[in-house]
């Protein structure tokens, strides 16, 4: 008979335990509407939008640059937009931490596997720049380059 009571107490504490976890998840969710987006490194190449990296026009003078930073290249490795464009960068890595810097602009991102790094910038002036990796990522780090053109 006392066993049944203990079972009930055990069951009730489990219910309370899960209720607390659920409550914490809800509170956390409500207070972090802009929480960081995640993506499994193994799934980068098969998960939209990274299954089709590239530059997509999403409005007048507005683009979305879906990019993968990997050992030791960027994909796509050349992004060209017209002057006056706003570009929403979305970058992730399937391997290790990389950098994503367009010198002379505000674009200087850290690309961490497991996360999607997002940044929006508007480019008013024409430029032809090298996208550089500024996080040491292995033997090919110094040749990990892309090209960014505003024309
Ligand atoms: Cu990628 Cu250094």
Image (tube, grey):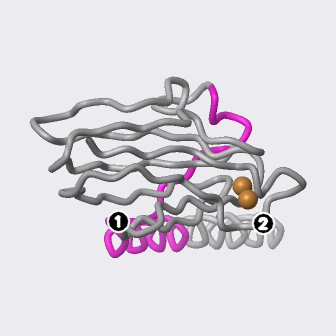
Q: In which quadrant is the N terminus drawn?
A: bottom right
Q: Which of marks 1 and 2 is in front?
A: 2
Element type where label 1 sits in the image: loop
Question: Residue 47: horizontal and vertical position, in percent?
Answer: 55, 30
Q: Disc 2 beta carbon < 8 A from ligand 1?
A: yes
* Residue 51 against residue 72 in the figure, above or below: above
Mark 2 surroundings within 10 Å by alpha-carbon count, few (fewer than 14), some (14 through 19), many (20 or more): few
Q: Which of 41 and 55 is in front in this view?
A: 55
* Camera-nearest residue between 125 and 46: 125
Quarter of the figure with the C terminus? top left
Q: Quadrant of residue 111?
A: bottom right
Residue shown at 51% from the left, 49% from the top: 91
Please tell me which residue is depicted at 50% across the width and 24% down the height of the picture: 52
Q: Position of residue 75 (x, y in %)?
A: 58, 35
Q: Mark 2 points at which residue?
A: 136
> Dot 1 corresponds to which residue?
34
Boundaries of the magenta span: 19-45
Q: Residue at x 26, y 51 (%)?
A: 126
């Amino acid at each position: 008979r006392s066993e049944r009571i203990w079972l009930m107490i055990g069951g009730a504490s489990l219910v309370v335990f899960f209720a607390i976890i659920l409550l914490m998840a809800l509170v956390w969710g409500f207070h972090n509407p802009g929480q960081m987006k995640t993506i499994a490194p193994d799934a980068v190449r098969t998960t939209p939008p990274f299954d089709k990296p590239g530059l997509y026009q999403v409005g007048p003078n507005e683009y979305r640059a879906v990019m993968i930073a990997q050992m030791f290249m960027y994909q796509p490795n050349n992004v060209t937009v017209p002057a006056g464009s706003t570009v929403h960068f979305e970058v992730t890595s399937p391997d290790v931490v990389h950098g994503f810097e367009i010198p002379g602009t505000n674009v200087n991102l850290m690309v961490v596997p497991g996360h999607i790094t997002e940044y929006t910038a508007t480019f008013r002036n024409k430029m032809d720049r090298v996208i550089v990796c500024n996080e040491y990522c292995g033997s090919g780090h110094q040749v990990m380059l892309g090209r960014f053109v505003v024309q």
